[in-house]
Image (cartoon, helix red, strand yellow):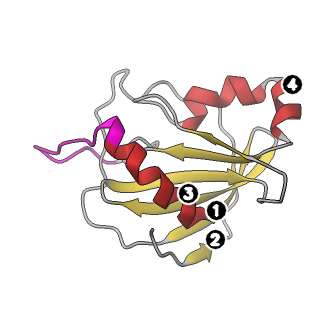
């Protein structure tokens, strides 16, 4: 499991309108240089749910996680993982923006994960980079979730 230092940043970030799929005229992205293992919490508002962003290193690159709410006994986690080429916003904003779903989501600890290199503004993959399979990404999830607490 990744060991992290969590650093609180003071920059607020507010939800933007959904972005188009990154593969609609965009190149795939990759972090390139090795990024140290750490987590960063950035105040973030996803729809009406205040959230924080975490950066978690995996064997395949840095995975982004947006966490809303805090874990409590009897409050299950709802984990989302977007389709290839999407961010959590482009894949789930309509679902979680719906009035009935907002009411349901208040009962959960929301965790929105984004695979390495799929976040908005990520740099291009280097030549010859082999993107991990879905199975490899799935195997990394328990460590990522454990790193989030």
In the rendering, which numbered label is found on residue 145?
Answer: 3
Q: Which mark is residue 9?
A: 2
Q: Earlier in the sequence, mark 1 or mark 4?
A: 1
| Residue pointed to by mark 1 | 42
Q: Which range of residues does the magenta coloring cover?
A: 123-135
Q: Which dot, 2 or 3, sits closer to the camera?
A: 3
Label 4 sits on a secondary structure element that is helix
The residues tagged by marks 2 and 3 sit, at their Cα atoms, a distance apart of 21 Å
> Which residue is pictured at 40% across the width and 53% down the height?
140
Where's residue 69, x and y in %? 78, 54
Disc 1: CA contacts within 10 A as few (<14), some (14-19) or many (>=20): some
Give the alpha-carbon distance from disc 2 to disc 4, as whole Å. Answer: 30 Å
Magenta region includes residue 130:
yes
Q: Is residue 73 left or right of residue 30?
A: right
Q: Is residue 120 above or below residue 95?
A: below
| Image disc number at residue 99 | 4
Disc 4 residue crowd, few under 14, some 14–19, many 20+, Cα 10 Å: few
Membership of 143 in magenta stretch: no
């Amino acid at each position: 499991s990744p060991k992290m230092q969590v650093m609180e940043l003071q920059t607020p970030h507010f939800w933007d309108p959904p972005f188009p799929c990154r593969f609609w005229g965009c190149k795939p992205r990759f972090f390139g240089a090795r990024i140290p293992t750490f987590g960063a919490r950035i105040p973030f508002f996803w729809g009406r749910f205040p959230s924080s962003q975490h950066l978690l290193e995996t064997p395949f690159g840095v995975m982004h996680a947006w966490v809303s709410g805090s874990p409590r006994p009897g409050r299950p986690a709802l984990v989302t993982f977007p389709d290839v080429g999407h961010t959590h916003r482009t894949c789930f904003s309509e679902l979680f923006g719906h009035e009935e779903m907002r009411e349901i989501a208040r009962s959960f600890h929301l965790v929105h994960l984004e695979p390495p290199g799929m976040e908005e503004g990520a740099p291009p993959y280097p030549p010859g980079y082999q993107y991990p399979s879905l199975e490899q990404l799935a195997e990394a999830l328990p460590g990522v979730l454990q790193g989030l607490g």
